[in-house]
Amino acid sequence: AAEPVAAEGPPEGGAPVEQRLLRAWSALSALWFLLPLVYFLTDPFFRSGAVQVVCAISLAAAYALSWHLSLVAIPVSELVAPHLGLNDGAVKRAHKTVGWCTAGWAFVHGAGQLVYFSSHGLLESLSFIPASTKGENLLYLLGVIALALFAAHCALALARKQSWLRNGFRAAHRYMAA
C-alpha cells in the first residue's frame, strides 16, 4: 500500500497532491457547469428572456450539483485517505470544501428553479401530490424534500463547533448523510 502524502509536502518538486487535486476538481466542476450552460444557451428558448437565462443557469447548476454530491459522499475516514494518496487531514479539508461548494450549487439550482416557477405562476398552481397525469410533480416533490434535508445538513455543519453539538457532531453528521 502506498504511503499517504502529507498535504504540505510537494512530491517530486511539483505542487502538493492536495493542491493538484483541488485544481483538477475545480476544472472539472467548471466543465460540469459550463458545457451544459453553453448547450442550453444555444436553444432559442433559453435566450428569450432574463428568466429563461436564469432557468438555463439553474439547470446547468444541476449538473455541477450532481458531480459534487457524488464526491461529497466519499466517506471521510482513515480507511479512505490512503487510497486517495492524502493524509486524513487533507481528506477532511477536501470533504468540507466539496460540501460547501455542493451547498452553493444547490442554492444556485434551487433558487433558479424557484425564480423560474414563480415568474410563470407555477408555484401557486403546482400540486406536490404525484398524479399519473403529472409525473413531473414527483420530481419537484423529491427536489423540495432534498432541499429541506440538505438545508438541515448545512445547518448541522454550521453548528458543529457549538458546545452542545461538538461531541455528537460526527454521529449526527453521518446519520443525516445516510
Image: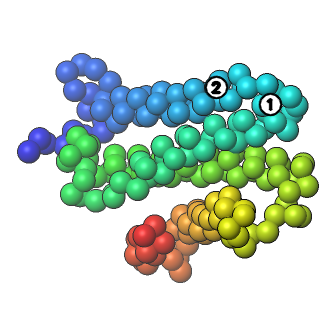
Query: Which color mode does the image show?
Result: rainbow
> Residue 50's spot in the image, x, y percent?
86, 33
The amino acid marked with disc number 2 is Tyr
Q: Residue at x 48, y 43 (%)?
A: 67
Q: Is any part of residue 148 visible from this angle?
A: no
- Mark 2 secondary-structure assignment: helix
Label 2: which residue? 39
Number of numbered discs present? 2
Quadrant showing the N terminus: top left
**Quick one: 15 or 40, which is closer to the camera?**
40
Q: Residue at x 86, y 57 (%)?
A: 122
> Residue 44's spot in the image, x, y percent?
79, 25
- Side of 30 relative to 133 (left or right): left
- Mark 1 secondary-structure assignment: helix
First in sequence: mark 1 vs mark 2: 2
The amino acid marked with disc number 1 is Phe
> Residue 109's spot in the image, x, y percent?
68, 47
Label 1: which residue? 45
Where 26 sits versus 69, above or below? above
- Side of 52 relative to 175 (left or right): right
Q: Residue at x 60, y 31 (%)?
A: 36
At label 1, counting other C-alpha atoms closer than 10 Å, the crowd grade (few under 14, some 14-19, many 20 or more) is few
**Quick one: 53 or 128, which is closer to the camera?**
128
